[in-house]
Amino acid sequence: MNVTLADISNDVQTGQLQPIYFVQGQDQYLLDLVRQQFLQVIQPEDRTLNLAQFDLTETPLSVAIDDAKSVPFFGDRRVVMIDKPYFLTGERTKNNLEHHTQDLIDYIQQPEPQTILIIFAPYEKLDNRKKLTKLIKERARYLSFVNMGEQEITKFITQKLKNAGYQISHEAQQTLMRLTNSSLTQMMAEIDKLMLYTVATKKIETADVNALVTHTLTENIFDLIDCLLKGKLTQAVNLYHELLLNGEEPLRLHGALIGQFRLLLQVKTSDKSEKGTASSLKVHPYRVKLARQIVRQFNYVRLAQAYLGLVAMEEQLKSTSRNPELLFELFVLKYQHEMVK
């Protein structure tokens, strides 16, 4: 059964807990938030006896299941947390552990009534063809953080600021999401710094975000593409030069550029909704939103010309020893010539 974080909080507060919970998502902030909820089930003085946590990249599944079958010591409930069940995905690990997944299948069908089993799957994608994956989603209280939308992320940010007596402007919030690539974990860390920075006014503006939040490669690529498409070619060359000076590898930088233009072309030609496009392309919905804002301003030909030009430049980067900055300048000159045709 699909549930929300509020549902889990309500389960804990009312004591109406179910035998099995399954939590999926890669955002560490949210995973930790859920973990803290379940820690409240066991009093601190009883956790040594009635709380167990297992990392399945280090411990066999059978050990965790045996522990879940144990009755609580001097208490009403036992909490068992299982992390990284990679056998639910298509991933392979280098460890030599042997996991008997039938043990978990058997347990799900007949769980220990006094044990609360929580399975944390920090993965974007699971193998839904597997019997065990289907069974867990069907029988457990299932909470998924995969591809959280902008509205959901915004709620966490505004609630944290409201609780602390702070405000953030809409533009500042959008800038923060863009600079952190809409990672809630990173956004929460940056919010802590921003609150210290604006303690006098308790209001966070765009200038504050730009002053404190580090620009990632993704954000720099966003700026570089913006300069290219808007014909600010000198600025584009200067930014490319700065990125190389700051230690970015030419091929990594180039791969990011090509990847972003590929996304722009895919979004430009998609007739699906924002969420549907994100799902089919397997990217975060916020990236699709930003891409849509860009592609509305430019026709397909301009986007395709830039993409093909960068692909040609990549071939030269890999096959010759020519200076990357010179190759980029030649690409820009050619692109400028094609734009004025």
Image (spheres, rainbow, N blue to C red):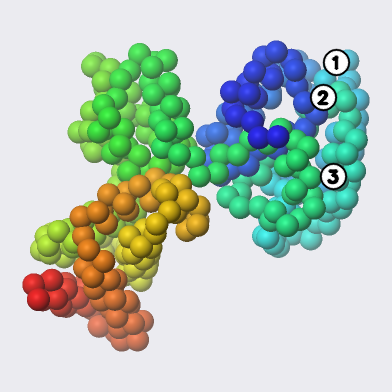
Q: Which quadrant is the C terminus positioned in? A: bottom left
Task: Give the label on residue 78, or none.
Answer: 2
Q: Name the image quarter holding residue 145.
A: top right
Measure how far apart labels 2 and 3 are at the Cα level: 17 Å
Q: Which mark is residue 75?
A: 1
In this view, 36 is above or below 44: below
Residue, x 33% and y 43% (percent of image)? 178
Which amino acid type is shown beneath numbered disc 3? Leu
> In the rendered image, is residue 126 in sight?
yes
Q: Residue furthest left?
A: 340
Amino acid type of the residue that numbered disc 1 sits on in the rendered structure: Gly
Question: Which residue is at 38% across, 51% downward?
Answer: 288
Q: Earlier in the sequence, mark 2 or mark 3?
A: 2
Please state the horizontal and vertical placement of residue 182, each as a whole percent of the image: 40, 42
Is the C-beta separation of discs 1 and 2 under 8 Å?
A: yes
Residue denoted by label 3:
104
* Residue 100 relative to residue 223: left or right: right
Q: Residues within 10 Å of mark 2 (few under 14, many from 20)?
A: many
